[in-house]
Amino acid sequence: MPIMLVHRCLGLQEYETVWRQMRDFTDSRTPETPDEAWLLEHPPIFTLGQAGRRHHLLDPGNIPVLQVDRGGQITYHGPAQLILYLLLDLRRRGLGVRQLVSLMEQAVIGLLGSYGVEARARRDAPGVYVAERKIASLGLRVRRGCSFHGLSLNVDMDLAPFDMINPCGFRGLEVTQTSDLGIDAPVDDIAMQLSRHIGRLLETTQT
């Protein structure tokens, strides 16, 4: 029997509120709880992963900074950046963390490829890149065999705050977004397509 994946489009949501909801969902779920994919946006915020180093935060200005429990270093979230949080029972799906990271990267690569944009993943630096510019960042947390957090995909946002950090801990790393690559599609449309790509890839992992 296929494992259910419930898709939720949540709009613009405060980061800390959704972070708390993800943890509560993960802590309260049972073996019968359906997996969920949350698609949303956040107001401006810098987040540091649990092993994040503050020297990668160069000049935050007035943007809030929050240390969180995902993997990875520092990144920026803001309006018109698509967030996908994957709340999955990895044991039930027979998925490892590395497999899930690759699946998320392939979903973004497939989405961009449908618009004729060639993208790739890097083994040494998780995420998705177009001509060496990063377009999607990944960070996960696994608790009791279940994942939360996920990925961010730059769509049509203000990229200037990325100059205030070393994105994902890499000095001088340039970023890009779908609107700068000739993709004329709003966040909601991109969200629907990414949701379909994720769903199809997860289906292929089921035994």
Image (cartoon, rainbow, N blue to C red):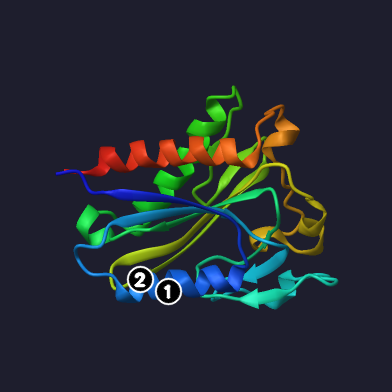
Q: Classify 81 as above or below 110.
A: below
Inspect the image, locate mark 1, and give the three-letter code of the amino acid beneath it: Arg
Residue extending farthest top: 116
Label 1 belongs to which residue?
Answer: 23
Identify residue for label 2: 26
In which image quadrant can residue 94 be found? bottom left
Mark 2: amino acid: Thr
Residue 20 drawn at (x, y percent) = 49, 75
Helix, strand or loop at label 2? It is helix
Dot 1 falls on a residue whose secondary structure is helix
Q: Residues within 10 Å of mark 2 (few under 14, many from 20)?
A: many
Residue sitting nearer the eye, 64 or 106: 64
66 or 102, nearer to the observer: 66
Q: Is residue 125 visible?
A: no
Q: Looking at the image, which is closer to me, 114 or 185?
A: 185
The x, y position of residue 162, in whole percent, is: 76, 57
Residue at horizontal 72 percent and vertical 69 percent from the top? 56
In the displayed structure, does residue 196 sit left or right of residue 70?
Answer: left
